[in-house]
Image: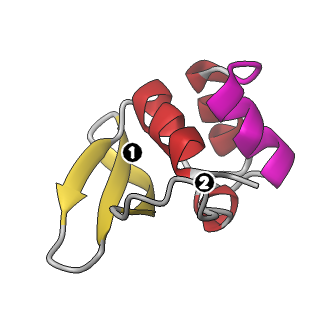
């Protein structure tokens, strides 16, 4: 399960910008060469054990790869290469 702590680690690794919204979620947006290539919501609640499993879909990777982003086996450059192979960036 992807937790809020994992989500925060992914935000840091991908150097995502946080856009605060009025509802219970913030939006993390990942840019590459000035273009938005991915975004995902982060709950602001204090319950850190709530799942954020949607992030893998939003980042266009498997849950395993998403967890790898959070726990360090997958680097930002490796993720960007995956996005290029999927035609999401050039």
Q: Can residue 19 be seen in this view?
A: yes
Q: Is residue 6 above or below residue 52?
A: above
Q: What secondary structure do most residues of the magenta stretch adopt? A: helix
The picture quadrant where one finds residue 69 is top right
Q: What stretch is highlighted in magenta?
A: 62-74
- Residue visible at 68% across and 19% down in the picture: 72
- Callouts 1 and 2 close, C-beta under 8 Å: yes
Task: Specify whether residue 43 is painted magenta.
Answer: no
| Residue at (74% x, 51% y) in the render | 61
Would you say residue 63 sits in the magenta stretch?
yes
Q: In this view, does 86 lie to the left or right of 39?
A: right
Q: Name the residue under label 2.
A: 59
Image quarter of residue 68 = top right
**Furthest residue in direction front, as rendered:** 47
Instruction: Find the distance from the CA under tag 1 to the CA under tag 2.
Output: 9 Å
Where is mark 1, residue-wise?
30
Q: Residues within 10 Å of mark 1 (few under 14, many from 20)?
A: some
Relative height, residue 63 to residue 44 (above, below):
above
Mark nearer the N terminus (1 vs 2): 1
The local secondary structure at tag 2 comes to loop
The reply, left or right, for residue 24 in relation to residue 88 is left
Q: In which quarter of the image is the N terminus?
A: bottom right
């Amino acid at each position: 399960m992807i937790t809020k702590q994992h989500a925060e680690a992914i935000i840091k690794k991908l150097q995502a910008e946080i856009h605060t919204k009025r509802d219970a979620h913030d939006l993390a947006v990942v840019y590459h060469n000035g273009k938005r290539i991915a975004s995902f919501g982060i709950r602001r609640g204090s319950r850190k054990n709530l799942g954020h499993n949607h992030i893998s879909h939003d980042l266009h990777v498997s849950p395993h790869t998403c967890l790898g982003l959070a726990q360090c086996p997958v680097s930002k450059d490796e993720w960007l290469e995956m996005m290029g192979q999927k035609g999401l960036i050039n």
